[in-house]
């Protein structure tokens, strides 16, 4: 009985260590394109990735046992890229790229109990840092109309049950 309990405890600690370590990567590349490096990191992390823009710049990188999120952020920062991550999907794009109208989406959220004007005010203050973000109110239907970049809409949708 004691042996079984000890074995189960060791197994649990080992599994926790494996889960903890799965976010840490080691990568060593020379002359690889930036896009290939982002794709490789996403693959190791078990994430989906969308690459937009010119990511053909050749880089050299040597990283050992580092959280993949930190590596992605540092790569994006050092190459003047914008990085979004939501629901297991990573979007990488140039900061200076102007989003096209195809990248914008509009959603209508009908409210049952909350006042649309109040909700619109909260959304404006909460998401004021998002590019291309706008909120309007349909008073007849007590609805909030949100327009923003496709890459940001999931953040807004989480605000509604």
Image: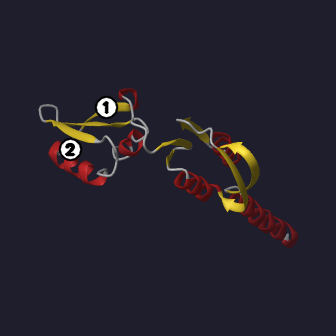
Q: Measuring 40% from the left and 42% from the top, which residue is drawn there? A: 152
Q: Measuring 35% from the left and 31% from the top, which residue is drawn there? A: 105
Res. 137 image quadrant: top left
Q: Measuring 37% from the left and 41% from the top, which residue is drawn there? A: 157
In the foreground, 98 or 9: 98
Earlier in the chain: of badge 2 and badge 1, it is 1
Residue 145: mark:
none
Question: In the visual, does 8 lie left or right of 69?
Answer: right
Q: Mark 2 near mark 1, Cβ–Cβ under 8 Å?
A: no
In the foreground, 57 or 2: 57
Q: Secondary structure at mark 1?
A: strand
Res. 19 image quadrant: bottom right
Question: In the visual, does 45 lie left or right of 76?
Answer: right
Q: Provide the residue designation for mark 1.
A: 106
x, y percentage for residue 128? 29, 51
Q: Residue furthest bottom?
A: 2
Question: In the visual, does 8 lie left or right of 67?
Answer: right
Q: How is the image coloured?
A: secondary structure
Q: Quadrant of the C terminus?
A: top left
On screen, residue 146 above or below 66: above
Q: Residues within 10 Å of mark 2 (few under 14, many from 20)?
A: few
Q: Provide the residue designation for mark 2.
A: 113
Q: Quadrant of the N terminus?
A: bottom right
x, y percentage for residue 133? 30, 42
Q: Residue furthest right?
A: 3
Q: Please name which of the two marks, 2 or 1, marks the residue nearer to the observer.
A: 1
x, y percentage for residue 134? 25, 40
Q: Secondary structure at mark 2?
A: loop
On screen, residue 26 above or below 94: below
Mark 2 and mark 1: span between their CA atoms?
22 Å
């Amino acid at each position: 009985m004691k042996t079984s309990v000890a074995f189960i405890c060791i197994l649990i600690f080992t599994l926790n260590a494996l889960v903890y370590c799965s976010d840490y990567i080691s990568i060593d590349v020379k002359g690889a394109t930036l896009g290939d490096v982002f794709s490789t990191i996403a693959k190791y992390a078990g994430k989906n990735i969308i690459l937009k823009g010119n990511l053909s710049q050749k880089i050299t990188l040597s990283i050992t046992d580092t959280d993949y999120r930190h590596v992605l952020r540092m790569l994006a920062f050092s190459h003047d890229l914008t990085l979004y991550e939501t629901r297991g999907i990573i979007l990488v794009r140039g900061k200076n790229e102007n989003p096209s109208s195809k990248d914008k989406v509009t959603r209508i959220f009908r409210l049952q109990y909350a006042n649309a004007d109040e909700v619109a005010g909260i959304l404006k203050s909460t998401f004021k840092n998002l590019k291309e973000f706008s909120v309007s109110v349909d008073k007849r239907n007590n609805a909030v109309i949100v327009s923003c970049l496709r890459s940001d809409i999931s953040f807004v949708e989480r605000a509604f049950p």
